[in-house]
Image: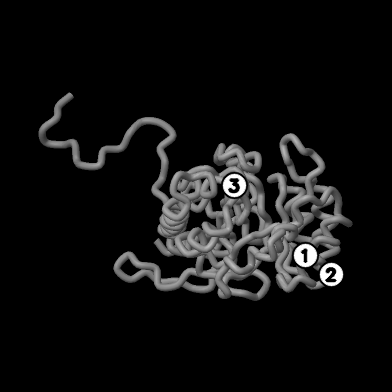
Amino acid sequence: MKHDLLEQIFWYRRREEQSGGMKSHSVDGGKMKKDSFVLGGKEFTSRFILGSGKYSMELIKAAVENAGAQIITLAVRRTNTKQGESILDYIPDNVTLLPNTSGARNAEEAVRIARMSRELGCGDFVKVEIMKDSKYLLPDNVETVRATELLAKEGFVVLPYMYPDLYTARDLVNAGAAAVMPLASPIGSNKGLATKEFIQILIDEIDLPVIVDAGIGRPSQACEAMEMGAAAIMANTAIATAGDVAAMAGAFKHAIEAGRSAYLAGLGRVLERGASASDPLTGFLHD
């Protein structure tokens, strides 16, 4: 009995460590009192990171508010538009900006874009995106590691977008990344968790928050990723292309919260074969 209890405590704490530096939580009547994670010394209670691409300016604020998002990504080239308006005018002040290096083809270009975002007042957070391939938009893991190391040395809080590869993830840890952001499927595809097994390896093996990014197309897929132990979800296209943007943002919010609660509760076991009755089968059935 004592051995079983110690084993349960060990795995419970292991789940906390793997799921993004959770500060503390307690359950009262099924309601979570506190469940937060930390990036770059900042504490976040929302585990939904919202992308801002593909939206009209008017819909961005509604999407952020319905999503309950505390972090929103933006392409540096979109911060200012031709008529003097700025995307920053549509993002609430209490939301942390996560500029990305979209358009960068190598580490040097990514560093240049990150420095520009800092000069524009977007802060020290940066999502490194380096893609040479214009057809599949797959991240260049080698250049991503180089950029992460360079930017971390300059004091940036670096969240690298990467193909889910264990060796690359370990290199990103050593390079100073604040989290890793593996793709679920090709960016903008809404195809869901195509790389599920590889993401699970990262969740199990990497001592950094794993934020599932790119390709999540439905709230149910976001929920599943959170059930796996992901620290957070980033979504953009699934919401921006929905019939009702604000309503879909809200649906993702609830799905992510449900998946997180299920993960913390501990999912029930799965039988490899056979069945197990929920109720006693004695007294009225005979062979």
Residue that badge 3 annotates: 200
Q: For this view, does 107 lie left or right of residue 117?
A: right
Q: Do the CB atoms of the residues marked 3 and 2 lie less than 8 Å apart? A: no
Q: Residue 83 at x, y = what percent?
A: 69, 61
- Name the amino acid type tagged 1: Gly
Gap in angstroms between the C-alphas marked 3 and 1: 21 Å
Which numbered disc flags the more N-terminal residue, 1 or 2? 2
Nearer mark to the viewer, of 1 and 2: 2
Q: What element carries label 1?
A: loop
Q: Is mark 3 on a helix, strand or loop?
A: helix
Residue that badge 1 annotates: 176
- Name the amino acid type tagged 3: Gln
166 and 59: which one is in front? 59
Q: Which residue lies furthest to the right in this view?
A: 108
Residue that badge 2 annotates: 153
Q: Residue 60 at x, y = what percent?
A: 55, 59
Q: Is mark 2 on a helix, strand or loop?
A: helix
Whether residue 251 is visible to the viewer of this picture, yes or no, is yes
Residue depicted at 82% across the width and 57% down the height: 110
Q: For this view, does 77 lie left or right of residue 242?
A: right
